Amino acid sequence: MYHALALLAVAWAATHWPLPAVHLAGWCFVVGTFLFSGSVYILALTETRWMGAVTPLGGLAFLLGWLALAWGVWRQGQ
């Protein structure tokens, strides 16, 4: 839920500061959503056990998205 709000924040930030870091943040949030949520859905619906190993990659993408967004906003403020 919070990462959907983060995508809205990225869209707002991209209109004000069209920096590569802000665009990277948006892509990280999208990839993180697909990897994290997608792997959890597949795991719950099919009980494919190896999909549980993909879930932390989605979390890593979320973390990278937050870092990229913070970096882009911070760089713009300088």
Image: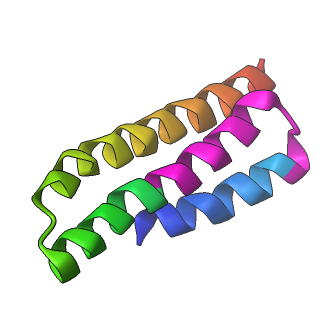
Q: Give me the residue at 37% from left, 48% from top.
A: 58
Measured as percent of width and height from the top left, residue 45 is found at 21, 82
Tally of numbered discs: 0
The residue stretch that appears in magenta: 15-32
Name, please, the residue furthest toward the top. 78
Identify the main secondary structure in magenta.
helix
Residue 20 vertical position relative to residue 56 in the rendered view, above or below: above
In the rendered structure, the answer to whether residue 17 lies left or right of residue 71 reads right
**Quadrant containing the N terminus in the rendered view:** bottom left
Front one among 5 and 30: 30
Measured as percent of width and height from the top left, residue 11 is found at 76, 58
Residue 29 vertical position relative to residue 70 in the rendered view, above or below: below
Q: Give me the residue at 55% from left, 67% from top.
A: 5
**Quadrant containing the C terminus in the rendered view:** top right
Q: Give me the residue at 57% from left, 56% from top.
A: 30
In the rendered structure, the answer to whether residue 25 lies left or right of residue 21 reads left
Front one among 10 and 62: 62
Measured as percent of width and height from the top left, residue 75 is found at 73, 21
Residue 67 vertical position relative to residue 41 in the rendered view, above or below: above
Quadrant assignment, res 76: top right
Front one among 4 and 71: 4
Indicate yes or no whether the magenta region holds residue 18.
yes
Front one among 32 and 6: 32
Indicate yes or no whether the magenta region holds residue 26.
yes
In the rendered structure, the answer to whether residue 53 lies left or right of residue 68 reads left
Measured as percent of width and height from the top left, residue 20 is found at 79, 29
The coloring applied to the image is rainbow
